[in-house]
Amino acid sequence: MFHNLSLKIVGLSFLFTLMFISVNVSAEVGNLTNEQMKELLAQNVPLIDIRRPDEWKSTGVVNNSHLLTFFDSRGNYNMEKWLTELNKIVNKNEKFILICRSGNRTGQVANFLDKKLAYTQVYHLQRGIKNWIKAGDKIVSAQ
């Protein structure tokens, strides 16, 4: 009987450990201010601009951004194609930053990558490039 109780305790310990590990696989999405994004960019953390080409041309882009459209003008997307391109830039365990016009699209994409696909170090710029430009932070023409 004592042996069976020991096995049950070991089994429960193992189960709780698995539950703890699985809960902590995803991390919280990092919501960045302009200053925090500058700090990460200074560390060469990749910045992925998920806006459309017409938006890049309209406002310009943050220097050294990877231009990788997520949603088209109708709100459609091709997840498989986008992830293939994203994985050429970063892997699931590397830090990267997403940027869009106002922070709405990147918030959605970042949460999806974190919660559903287990990307562990996803950041996005709160209030997007509109706030970046409003604050007088540097942009360049889209290439």
Image (cartoon, rainbow, N blue to C red):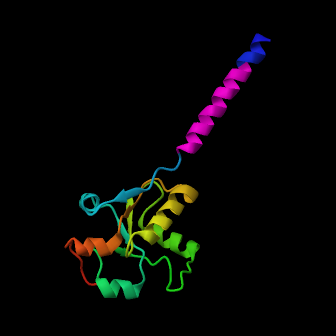
Please indicate, yes or no, whether residue 128 appears anywhere in the rendered image: yes
Q: Position of residue 140 (x, y in %)?
A: 24, 80
Left or right side of 62 for 117 = right
> What is the total number of numbered labels drawn onto the structure image?
0
Name the quarter where the C terminus is drawn.
bottom left
Decide whether the magenta segment is chiefly helix, strand or loop: helix
Q: Position of residue 36 (x, y in %)?
A: 27, 58
Q: Is residue 63 among what the camera can see?
A: no
The residue at 28%/74% (across/down) is 62
Give the image location of residue 92, x and y in percent.
48, 57
Task: Name the residue at 51% across, 57% down.
Answer: 114
Was residue 82 drawn as part of the magenta stretch in this picture? Answer: no
Q: Does residue 126 lie above or below 129 as drawn?
A: above
Q: Residue at x 41, y 78 (%)?
A: 51
Residue at far right of view: 1
Magenta span: 7-24
Q: Determine whether, in the image, residue 136 is placed left or right of residue 105.
A: left
